Amino acid sequence: AKAKVVVIGGGYGGATAAKYVRLLSDYKIDVVLIEPEQAFISCPISNLVLSGGKQIGDITTSYAGLSRNHGVTVVRDYASAIDTAKKTVTLAGGATIAYDKLVVAPGVELMFGSIEGLKAANDAGQVLQAWKAGAETVALRRQLEAMPDGGVYAITIPEAPYRCPPGPYERASVIAGYFKAAKPRSKVLILDANPDVTSKGPLFKKFWAEQYKGIIEYRNQHKATAVDAKAGIIKFDVQDDVKANVLNVLPSMRAGTIAVQAGLNNQANNHWCGVNYLTFESTAAKDVHVLGDSIQVAPAMPKSGHMANNHGKVAAAAIVAQLSGWDVNPAPMLTNTCYSFVDGKNVIHVASVHEYVAAEKTFKAVAGSGGVSAGPTELEGSYALSWASNIWADTLI
Ligand code: FAD
């Protein structure tokens, strides 16, 4: 019988792994991808949907390319249980699928319980996160449009590590750009649980001081503990309450729910999943590979789509080699680029290269590699949009 790889989650990590197992095995290994969403909606570029420069359709890609071009069997369902002893996955729809190798790439779970009142406020559609792009992105855009001029939009940022270190600062920036043009008396409040801006700090702060003076206000050391959606109030562990018209409250994050249910979350107070960085195989279960935001990252590795795509390729190569009985000696090298819009057009980036260091069994940033922009430019804006089209094609087409 043909070997079979089952992939849970068709995001940047899982979809890439599904495609590359097919490619690298010369289409000899069967791949089943389980994903509940009808289409892939990208978090990268989704902040521009909030500021009005893009529509949700611009960041949506069909899963049809994976089946049509690569013969991946895409099953629209939700994995509800994994039996790592029997090597099976059970779907919410009731079916059970057996695997030789399993890839678990469910992204992050937002820990609503860490902020009092947040779950109910989210269920009621009052306080949104939009930290998984989709219907919430569109709903948050509507809240921003409906906000009167002179209103306040507040975003809270949980302690690192969380999905996409520069993402909240990019979001605050592009929303400030929208306010500056459309409702100039409005304000953006950034309430950060961290001691300082987590990514590209000097670049963001310089731009805020130059372009968004009186619009963006940044406050560090603000750890949200409760929300009162009706009164529009956010409470913090130490600092004073904050009142705002639009509340965008991001709770702490951990590995996706299915990874936690399967007991793969064996790192960092059970927040993240430990992997062997050479293969991305779980350190908690055999023949299970964990990718993307769910893993305990190596030093200086961000939780990004670019990284998740790279994880997918390293894992696919390891899985194909193992299932084919090839004797290989991999030495993976990963790259990362995160572009951030600071307004509708201008962009800054951070880039890095990470090499596997066998003696320490981890990835380390290569000294002298990567770097950050000198400052925002429209040229980098065009690179950012090209980066997005290229990675969507590499992951899904
Ligand atoms: P995801 O891409 O979230 O994919 C997980 C998938 O698993 C989802 O499709 C989900 O439906 C599915 N799933 C979950 N549970 C199950 C289950 N039980 N059964 C079946 N399927 C399941 N990264 C960059 O590189 N560059 C950027 O510019 C950038 N900008 C960002 C901006 C914002 C606002 C945000 C929020 C993130 C941004 N990121 C960016 C980060 C990037 O989106 C994530 O790091 C990336 O999506 C992680 O990939 P993943 O495969 O781990 O998870």
Image (cartoon, helix red, strand yellow):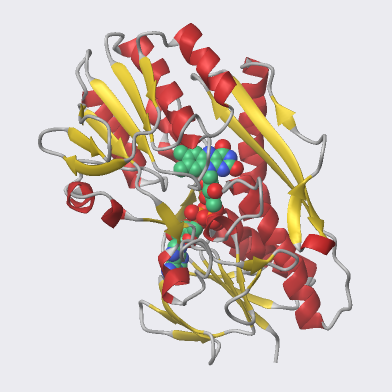
| Residue 124 in view here | yes
Q: Position of residue 233 (x, y in %)?
A: 17, 33
Q: Residue furthest front?
A: 238
State the residue lying farthest toward the left.
230
Q: Tell how many labels.
A: 0
Q: Quadrant of residue 150?
A: top left
> Where is residue 256 shown, x and y percent of the image?
45, 62
Location of the N terminus (image quadrant): bottom right
Q: Nearer the viewer, residue 332 or 275?
A: 275
The answer to which of 392 and 203 lies nearer the viewer is: 203
The picture places residue 239, in percent across and down from the top left corner, at 27, 31
Q: Quadrant of residue 202?
A: top right
What residue do we see at 40% from left, 45% from top?
A: 131
Q: Nearer the viewer, residue 227 or 93?
A: 227
Q: Left or right: 23 with respect to 240?
A: right
Q: Position of residue 59 (x, y in %)?
A: 49, 40
The reply to whether residue 65 is visible in this rendering is no
- Residue at x-position 33% and y-position 38%: 138
Name the residue rendered at 76%, 63% in the picture: 361
